[in-house]
Image (cartoon, rainbow, N blue to C red):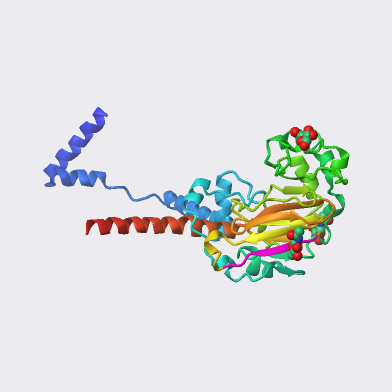
C-alpha cells in the first residue's frame, strides 16, 4: 500500500514536470486500459447463452413467462396450472364490481353436444355464460363405478382426508368418515330413512389417483387448460341440496352428474338483477354443467329418486391467469393510483 502511494507520488511529480496539472494526471492514471479480446468473447458467449435461454423457455410468450414464474415459485406448471399465484388478499382488495355484460345476454342456459374445444373456449369457457354439455362422459367409467360403497372402501383408513374441506349441509356429520359409518339402510335411501346430502374436496393423493382412473378431463375443455388438482364430490338424496350462495374460488368449474338428477337455480349478482335473468335447469345423469360459480348465485336440489353423485373441478388456462392478473389486479391498481393522484391535485387547487 505504502509502496503504491510512493509510486503514484512519483508519477504525479513526473507529470507535473511534464506540465500537466495534478487533477489531469489523476484522470490519466484512472483511464482504463483497452479491453482484452478475451473479455469481449466472454461477453458475446454470455449474450448468446442468455438469448438461447429466452428462446428455449419461450420467454417471449405469455405461456413461457407464466411457466418461468411458476418454476421460480417452485410449482410444477403441468400439475397445477390453476395455482393462483397472486396473493389472495390483493385479489379481494382489487376485485372490481361484477360487470353485468357477463349475464346480460344469457336468455337461457344452452344444452350442447359434440362441441369443439375451440367453440367452447370462444363461447363459454371464460365468458360467464353457463352451458350444459350432454355428451361429456363418453368413455368414462365413473358413472358405473362411483357409489356410496365405492367411496366408503376408498376412504377407509385415509388420514389425509380428515384435514380436508367437508360440507355437512343439514346433516349432523362432522367428518367424512362419519358419513361412511351411517347404517346401510340410510345410505341406500330406503323408505322412512333420514335423507342426507354431503360434499367434500379430495385431499388424499392416493384416492385422487384412483378416482381419476375413472374419468378424464372433459373433452371440450380448451387444449391448454388444466383441471385443478382438487376434485369436489357431492352425494345425497332427493329433496336435499345446497342453499343459495356464491363461491369464491377464482376459476370457473365443471360439475359432472354421474348419478341421479339435480336442479340448479341461478341468480345473477345483486348489482345485475335489473339487467339479467335468473334461470332454473335440470342436470340429468350423463351431463356436465359448466358454471362460473363466482358470478352466478346458485342453489341445488336433488330431484331424482335415486342417489345423486356429482364430481367437479375448477379449470383455467395459463392465458386466463395472466388475463385475470392484468384485468383484476394491475388495471384496478393503476386506476386506484390514478384516482389518488387526481385527488391530490384537486386538493391543491
Ligand atoms: C377416454 O379416452 C381418452 C382418449 O380417447 C383417454 O385419454 C382417456 O384415458 C379415456 N378415459 C377413460 C376413463 O377411459
Ligand atoms: C345424528 O343424529 C341422529 C339422530 O337424528 C343420531 O342418531 C346420530 O347418532 C347423529 N350422528 C352424529 C354423527 O352425531
Ligand atoms: C326442476 O327444474 C325443472 C326445470 O328444469 C322444473 O320444471 C321442475 O319443477 C323443478 N323441480 C323442482 C322440484 O323444483
Q: Quadrant of residue 127?
A: bottom right
- The residue at 49%/51% (across/down) is 46
Looking at the image, residue 322 sits to the left or right of residue 150; the answer is left
Query: Relative to the observer, which residue lies in front, 242 or 208?
Result: 242
> From the viewer's perspective, is residue 4 above or below residue 91?
above
Query: In the picture provided, is 203 more to the left or to the right than 154?
Result: left
Q: Is residue 189 above or below residue 125?
A: above
Residue 142 position in % (x across, y down): 83, 52
Tally of numbered discs:
0
**Residue sticking out furthest to the front:** 192
Measured as percent of width and height from the top left, residue 227 is found at: 69, 53
Please provide the residue range marked out in magenta: 276-284
Instruction: State which quadrant residue 111 falls in.
Output: bottom right
* Residue name at image x 78 percent, y 38 percent: 179
> Is 25 or 159 nearer to us in this picture?
159
102 and 24: which one is in front? 102
Residue 100 is covered by the magenta coloring: no
Asked if residue 92 lies left or right of residue 346, the reply is: right
Residue 219 visible to the viewer: no
Q: Is residue 277 magenta?
A: yes
Q: Position of residue 329 (x, y in %)?
A: 48, 55
Quadrant containing ligand 1 reads bottom right
Residue at image point 37% right, 55% down: 337
In the rendered image, the quadrant that contains the C terminus is bottom left
Horizontally, residue 88 falls left or right of residue 214, namely left
Q: Nearer the viewer, residue 325 or 75?
A: 325
Q: Residue furthest top?
A: 2
Q: Quadrant of the N terminus?
A: top left
| Residue 138 visible in the picture | yes
Residue 253 pos. (x, y %): 67, 56
Amino acid at each position: 500500500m505504502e509502496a503504491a502511494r510512493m509510486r503514484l507520488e512519483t508519477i504525479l511529480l513526473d507529470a507535473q514536470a511534464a506540465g500537466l496539472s495534478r487533477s489531469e494526471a489523476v484522470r490519466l492514471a484512472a483511464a482504463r486500459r483497452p479491453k482484452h479480446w478475451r473479455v469481449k468473447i466472454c461477453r458475446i458467449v454470455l449474450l448468446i447463452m442468455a438469448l438461447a435461454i429466452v428462446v428455449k423457455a419461450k420467454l417471449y410468450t405469455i405461456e413461457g413467462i407464466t411457466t418461468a414464474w411458476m418454476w421460480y415459485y417452485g410449482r410444477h406448471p403441468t400439475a397445477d396450472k390453476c395455482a393462483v399465484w397472486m396473493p389472495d388478499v390483493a385479489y379481494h382488495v382489487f376485485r372490481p364490481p361484477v360487470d353485468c355484460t357477463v349475464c346480460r345476454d344469457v336468455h337461457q342456459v344452452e344444452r350442447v353436444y359434440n362441441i369443439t374445444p375451440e367453440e367452447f373456449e370462444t363461447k363459454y369457457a371464460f365468458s360467464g355464460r353457463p352451458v350444459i354439455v350432454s355428451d361429456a362422459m363418453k368413455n368414462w367409467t365413473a358413472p358405473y363405478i362411483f357409489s356410496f360403497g365405492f367411496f366408503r372402501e376408498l376412504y377407509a383408513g385415509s388420514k389425509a382426508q380428515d384435514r380436508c374441506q367437508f360440507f355437512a349441509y343439514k346433516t349432523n356429520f362432522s367428518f367424512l368418515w362419519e358419513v361412511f359409518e351411517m347404517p346401510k339402510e340410510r345410505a341406500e335411501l330406503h323408505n322412512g330413512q333420514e335423507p342426507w346430502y354431503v360434499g367434500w374436496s379430495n385431499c388424499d393423493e392416493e384416492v385422487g389417483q384412483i378416482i381419476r382412473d375413472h374419468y378424464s378431463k372433459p373433452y371440450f375443455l380448451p387444449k391448454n387448460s388444466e383441471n385443478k388438482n382438487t376434485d369436489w364430490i357431492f352425494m345425497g338424496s332427493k329433496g336435499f341440496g345446497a342453499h343459495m350462495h356464491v363461491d369464491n374460488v377464482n376459476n370457473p368449474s365443471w360439475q359432472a352428474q354421474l348419478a341421479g338428477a339435480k336442479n340448479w337455480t341461478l341468480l345473477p349478482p345483486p348489482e345485475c338483477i335489473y339487467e339479467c335473468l335468473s334461470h332454473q335447469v335440470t342436470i340429468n345423469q350423463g351431463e356436465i354443467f359448466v358454471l362460473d360459480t363466482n358470478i352466478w348465485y346458485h342453489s341445488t336440489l336433488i330431484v331424482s329418486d335415486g342417489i345423486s353423485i356429482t364430481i367437479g373441478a375448477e379449470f383455467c388456462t395459463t392465458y386466463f391467469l395472466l388475463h385475470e392478473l392484468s384485468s383484476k389486479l394491475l388495471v384496478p391498481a393503476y386506476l386506484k393510483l390514478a384516482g389518488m393522484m387526481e385527488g391530490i391535485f384537486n386538493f391543491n387547487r
